Amino acid sequence: MGGVAHLVFGVFGNANGLLLFLAPTYGLPFVSPHNLLVTTINVTGAAIESIYVLIFLILSPRREKGKILGLLTVVLAIFAAVALISYFALHGRNRTIFCGLAASIFSIIMYASPLSIMRTVIRTKSVEYMPFFLSLFVFLCGTCWFLYGLLGKDPFIAVPNGFGSGLGTVQLILYAIYHNKKGETKKPSVDGSVEMELAKPQQSQNGHV
């Protein structure tokens, strides 16, 4: 029964992971064999996320392109270093532990990225910048992979995705609290940037609210 539940949560994790690619990278075959579910979602996720980055680089302003290219260079350098060290310097269990720790750290950082948006939601009392379905799939993906890792006794999957499941839960709670509130509206400033101001009822032509 435990094996069936393990497989079911793995399949659900793949389905939800297609919408949010958060599976840890140490599932690659040369690191951790017999881990087909984790490998497939990572390959799919890496391909689609690469397309997202490419689209952003093509359509973004020149200044933003520079920032993203710099960040992308750093990320690729770190990934290359982890891959080279794990492949050439480590073997067997040491390779699995090294890649598992690296993947867990990156997964937690990735899950923690919406924290600034959650702070904005609380400050503005508006969920405009935190789409419901994104929060929902953070929760579903994190929960499915957490249970998959838990049932498979794999801490490198269970721990970061348990963290993601908790953050997804908090996002859904915030959405439930603030989704019907007007909060703050955006007001363009003179220099073209966006400022926030409290939403105010508009006055009619005779001056009454």
Image: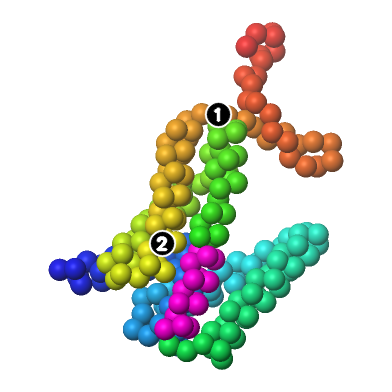
Residue plotted at (46% across, 38% down) = 174
Q: Quadrant of residue 158?
A: bottom left
Measuring from the top left, give residue 47's x and y in whole percent.
Answer: 54, 75
Residue plotted at (51% across, 47% down) = 131
Q: Label 2, on which residue?
A: 159
Measuring from the top left, give residue 167's x and y in whole percent.
Answer: 45, 49
Please provide the residue range marked out in magenta. Answer: 93-107
**Residue 121, placed above or below residue 110:** above
Q: Residue furthest front?
A: 94
Measuring from the top left, give residue 201's x and y in whole percent.
Answer: 62, 19
Q: What element does badge 2 sit on? A: helix
Q: How many marks?
A: 2
Q: What amino acid does circle 1 point to? A: Lys
Residue plotted at (75% across, 62% down) = 67
- Report whether 202 appears left or right of 11: right
Q: Tell me which secondary structure the magenta stretch mostly adopts.
A: helix
Q: Is residue 39 visible?
A: yes
State the residue in front, 131 or 208: 131
Which circle's residue, 2 or 1, is located before the other in the chain? 2
**Residue 41, placed above or below residue 205:** below
State the residue in front, 116 or 198: 116
Q: Quadrant of residue 109?
A: bottom right
The Cα–Cα distance between marks 2 and 1, rounded to whole angstroms, is 36 Å
Q: Residue furthest right?
A: 191
Q: What amino acid does circle 2 point to? A: Val
Q: Label 1, on which residue?
A: 182
Judge the density around disc 1: few (<14), some (14-19), many (≥20) Cα neighbours within 10 Å.
Answer: some
